[in-house]
Amino acid sequence: MNTKRWILKLLAVILSAAPVVAQAQVPVRVSYIPILDVAPLFVGIEKGFFKEQGLDVTAMPSSGGAAGIPGLMGGAYDVIFGNVVSTYLAQSQGFNLRVIAAGTKLTNDGEITTGLVARTSDQLKSGKDLEGKTVAVNTRNGVIWLFARSWIAKTGGDPAKVRFREVGFPQMTDALRAKQVDAAFNVDPFFSAAIAGDEFEMIGQPYPEVQPGVEVGQWVMTEEFYENHPEIVRKYTSAFREATAWYNANRNTPEVRNIISGYTKMKPELLEKMDLQELPTYIDPTAQQATADLMLESGMLKSRLDVNPIISPEATQ
């Protein structure tokens, strides 16, 4: 009996010392734009929130939602950071998409994080002043493009008399400095860095001036992926929400600034001068419907689009 008990104890020790085989991580390919708004994605990667859910997330850069959607539909990505305009324009054209998480919300309160920037010496002040000029936007037919045109019209100009040039957010300030464009609708961290000195100035805030409370960015996948992989969606959105909460609680710390510097390539000392904005945890469908209605008014949509069926329940609660 003693021998049997000893063998059992020895077997227990051997089993406890055996290496644990790690569960295979599920790959998820995510397209992003290198701006402040996507910080939770990189927080989730670097802090291990996705890995805790069994997901191996690979981040892949893109110029904007209008460029990311073709890759999403073609199977190059599983999730993309897009914008309300590109998403709902694609939906109206027959693509089946699903919004799974909030990205960006702009208000008239707090820190100014986006705006139209021009050379101070040019003294441009309104949409009327931009007629005959060239304005940089990250992509055509995207949210930046729509709100730039709407702001120009709202402030006395004719958008049809303004040239729009596609320029990546990180390159907009250099394009202004080289006089390749006359104004640029930029976002943080590049916007705040541009207006920090005397060379450039903000001439307008298209987002809050056209639609207060506008929700600009969002995270999107295909309806097919959403329906066929509910467990991956649940794990991804759970980890992403955890990452967003962590970012909001720690957004003005050196650790977060280093994370943002890593994917934007902006020097940490420049980021130190910024009060990093809080990012939304949930989507407000009413705000997104207002943007879809603006698209209709602007002629981007042929008929009114109801956004509610496109936004997943997980993104609103």
Image (cartoon, grey):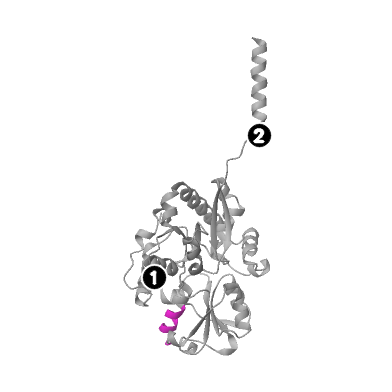
Name the quadrant containing residue 272: bottom right
Q: Position of residue 133 (x, y in %)?
A: 52, 88
Residue 169 x %, y %: 57, 73
* Rendered residue at 54%/58% (across/down): 30
Q: Which mark is residue 19?
A: 2
Quick check: can you spot residue 250?
no
Q: Is residue 131 left or right of residue 309?
A: right
* Residue 271 forms part of the magenta stretch: no
Visible residue check, residue 82 = yes
Q: Amino acid at mark 1?
A: Thr
46 versus 68 height, above or below: above
Considering every residue shown, the one lying at the far front of the view is 74
Q: Give the residue pinned by disc 1.
A: 291
The spot of residue 40 in percent (x, y) is 55, 58
x and y, in percent, of residue 118 in the image: 56, 83
Give the mark nearer the N terminus: 1 vs 2: 2
For the stretch drawn in magenta, the main secondary structure is helix
Given this view, does label 1 or label 2 mark the residue nearer the observer? 2
Q: Which residues are magenta?
A: 148-157
Proximity of marks 1 and 2: CB atoms separated by less than 8 Å: no
Mark 1: few, some, or many residues within 10 Å (few <14, many ≥20)?
A: many
The kind of residue tagged 2 is Pro
User: Furthest-left residue in view?
Assistant: 303
Residue at 43% across, 70% down: 85
Q: Is residue 262 left or right of residue 31?
A: right
